[in-house]
Structures are given as C-alpha cells and as structure tokens.
Image (spheres, helix red, strand yellow):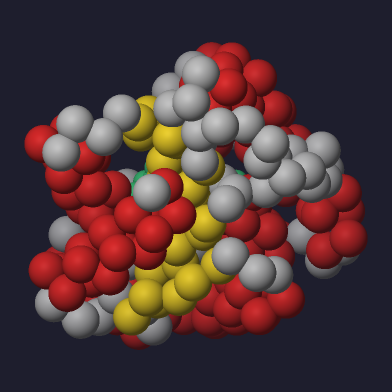
Amino acid sequence: MFKNKYSGKFIAIEGLDGSGTTAQVQRLSQYFHSEKIHSLFTQEPTNNVIGGVARGCLTGDLKINSAVGLQLLFAADRANHLEKEIIPALQAGTNVITKRYFLSSIAYGSVQINDQDWLWKINDQFLMPDLTILLKISAKTRIERSEQSALGLNLFNDEESLNKVWQTYEAISKKYPNIIIIDAEKPQDEIFEEIKRAVLDIIK
Ligand code: TYD
C-alpha cells in the first residue's frame, strides 16, 4: 500500500454492520457541512457499476458462487473508486471520508478466504488511509441490533463468523498505526464526539 502524499487527508470508518458506521458518517457529514469544512463523503461498495455488482452479490440479486470472485469485485471497485473519485479529490486538497475501505475486505473476507496473504496482495496497490476509525461492538450486540432493525447488506449473521470478522479487524489494528478503536456501545453523542476529535486532529 502507498502513503498519502496528496494535500487532502484520507479517512476510513469501519466496523461490523450495526456498529453505527452509517449514522456516524452521516452526522460527521452534517457537521462538516455546517462548519464549511470542504470534504468528500463516500462509501464502499460504491454506487457505480462495479460496486453495484458487488452489492447485488451481497443482497442475492446476483448470484456469485465464488468467494474469490467476490473479493476481486470489491478490489476492482476500490481501484476504480481510488482512480475516479478519491485520488482526484485528495489531489485537489479535499479531505475524503469513506465508509468502509480495504479493512472490510480483509476482515469480512477472512470468513470465506483462508489465504489472508492473497487478500492483502489484491489490496496492496491501494492508498493507505491517514486514519481509520474502527467502531467496536460485540457480535452479540450486532445480532441483537439486526433483530430490531433491517440492517443493510449482510453476508453473515452467525455469531461465529461475526466474531472472526471482529478478531481480524482487531488483529490488524494492533499491527498498523493510524487505526483507532472506538467503543460503539456507548451513547451515540459520546461516540460522535470521539470521532469528531480524532478526525479534526488529522485534518487540521
Ligand atoms: P452496507 O449495508 O452497504 O454498509 P454498512 O454496513 O457499512 O452500513 O454493507 C456493506 C457490506 O459489505 C458489509 O456487510 C461489509 C461488506 N463488505 C465486504 O465484505 N468487503 C468489502 O470490501 C466491503 C467494502 C464491504
């Protein structure tokens, strides 16, 4: 992976589904808007063609029997996302905040792909975020939340798989700098304050 040499900062927000990534990213976007902090809010899988295919596979609208094929789709979507949206924005000095990025591939991918080295390899030409915020909830909370609300696209719903996803997220966060974990079982306002502080620290 390569370091961000552009003038804008690149931030990723990650976590298990149901950890509040969507709500917190939305809140951050509103805050940036009100403070007139110029930035691009985006997400993966993207809403473009390749991301749409990946989403279709997650919802079951499209059928892909190959776990390897799905990972290649996520990576192709990421390559396109970087080239067409993220890097041009960073070059122009715009900060980019993405909901989900390559850590989702490594963490979620770890359930279906045994060869972790391969997962890293297909992601190793990509830009490293300046900061990754990882929202932490237990697999149990994740399952409880999915019973209460319609969570988006879910590949896995069982506790064992979700534990594996989380353990992979956590293992990576110990190995790499610039990844911070925030307890996402706390009140939403407190979580937001922590995210805001971490992000402002990086972009100011
Ligand atoms: P979605 O409902 O769009 O987002 P969120 O949970 O972030 O609000 O779900 C995206 C799903 O795609 C999520 O379960 C994680 C998964 N995913 C991967 O497995 N690999 C990836 O590389 C990406 C980007 C996402």
**Observer-nearest residue: 66 or 48?**
48
Marker count (numbered): 0
Please give the name of the residue rendered at 16% of the width and 44% of the height, measured from the top-left corner.
Answer: 31
Q: Position of residue 38 (x, y in %)?
A: 31, 28
Q: Look at the picture and state if 85 lies above or below 189.
A: above
Write down the quadrant of residue 136 in the picture: bottom left
Where does the image place residue 35, in percent across and percent down from the top left? 15, 38
Residue at the image position 38 percent from the left and 49 percent from the top: 204
Q: 147 or 196, which is in the foreground?
A: 196
- Quadrant position of residue 167: bottom right
Name the outermost residue toward the front.
204
Q: Is 21 left or right of 160, judged from the image as shown? A: left
Residue shown at the point (82%, 38%) measured from the top left: 125
Residue 158 in sight: no
In the drawing, does residue 127 fall left or right of residue 119? left
Residue 38 visible in the displayed image = yes
Q: Nearer the viewer, residue 128 or 99?
A: 128
Q: Residue 34 at what x, y percent from top left?
A: 11, 36
Above or below residue 156? Residue 5 is above
Residue 106 vertical placement versus 165 (above, below): above
Q: Position of residue 104 (x, y in %)?
A: 57, 55
Identify which residue is drawn at 74% across, 39% down. 126
- Left or right: residue 140 compared with residue 123: left
